[in-house]
Amino acid sequence: MRVVLVSTSPRRRELLKRLVPVFDVVEPAGEGEVRREGHPAGVVLSLAELKLNSVDRKGGIYLAADTVVEVDGRILGKPSGFEEAFGMLKGLSGRWHRVYTGVVVERDGRRISGVECTKVKFAPLSDDEIGWYLETYRPFDKAGAYGIQDGAEIFVEKIVGSYSNVVGLPLALVYRFLKRLGFKNCVWKRLADVARVVRSKNAGPFEVTFDIMFDDEESYFYFKRGSFLDKEAFARLYGIEVEDVLVFEYFDQALALKITIKRDVPSGSVGDEDVYAAQMHLPLMNFMIPWKVYG
């Protein structure tokens, strides 16, 4: 099942990979301004919903999230610069604060949402420590002006609740929501685990041809019938136009898939080993396949 993360955050991408090794990412049309009034749970939910509503949602499960830090009733979003970040960390020094993340998931019009809250206690921080941290890690894209996974873990004395929530995506909550919308756990394999990707010698000077030779019939027909890769998906994988995929054909007797695409650099112009074509193999060899589904 296709999962789509609506986010610009590299941290949320890395966290989601622990649950879903392969997913699509779309950037929200608008991030929205963090409201400084109201309950933090309501603020993060409205921001997550704003992100989700800003994109077209067709086919699959769509996921959006937003995070804020709250201390003494004050909501801290992303700092505008060094001075505000310094003030934020000064206010967190030696104190408890709460991290709230709102999560919204949707599939075919059915929407589920919720909020995770984690309590975090910082050790007392000197001005020098704060200055060093800000200069070294520059956490100006993070709520509360710190990333627990980016150096700030040395300031943390205690955590009560979800660690991944402090990073930006509460995985246990996300997993529960995904399951409610039909998500199933999979064992994933790379294409290189079940087939050999061989560059054909018969390609034209402005073409690259991949002969994907499967190890056995079971793997070949599972891949073919599963429709894991077609011309459109291959074009997305390589960032090219569908029209540039000249050949996409299965050969049952040979247990092979042949793919030919246009190339910008003519063969023979980059050395005898044709480094260009060799590099083109990598995305295909690392293409991930949901090989076994549980549940």
Image: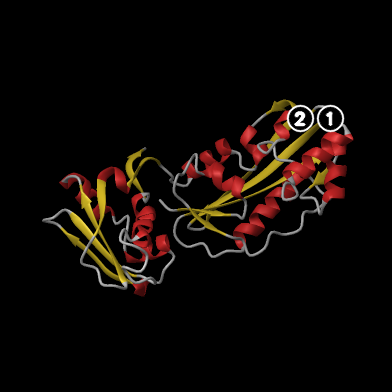
Left or right: 52 in relation to 108: right
Can residue 165 be spotted in the picture?
Answer: yes
Left or right: 22 in relation to 256: right
Q: Percent position (x, y) of residue 272? A: 30, 61
Q: Percent position (x, y) of residue 15? A: 56, 41
Q: Quadrant of residue 54?
A: bottom right
Q: Percent position (x, y) of residue 239? A: 44, 65
Q: Name the residue rendered at 64%, 55% in the picture.
A: 49
Q: Percent position (x, y) of residue 41? A: 73, 44
- The residue wearing badge 1 is 95
Q: In which quarter of the image is residue 135?
A: top right
Please state which of residues 65 and 207 is positioned toward the viewer in this rendering.
207
Question: In the rendered view, would you say 236 is above or below 190?
Answer: below
Q: Earlier in the sequence, mark 2 or mark 1?
A: 1
Left or right: 129 in relation to 22: right
State the residue lying farthest toward the left: 253
Name which residue type carries label 2. Answer: Phe
Q: In which quarter of the image is the C terminus?
A: top left
> Viewer-nearest of labels 2 and 1?
2
Q: Name the residue rendered at 57%, 64% in the picture.
A: 55
Question: In the rendered view, would you say 234 is above or below 126?
Answer: below
Q: Name the residue rendered at 41%, 68% in the picture.
A: 240
Name which residue type carries label 1. Answer: Arg
Q: Which numbered disc covers residue 155?
A: 2
State the residue lying farthest toward the front: 271
Q: Name the residue rendered at 34%, 62% in the picture.
A: 271
Question: In the rendered view, would you say 130 is above or below 198?
Answer: above
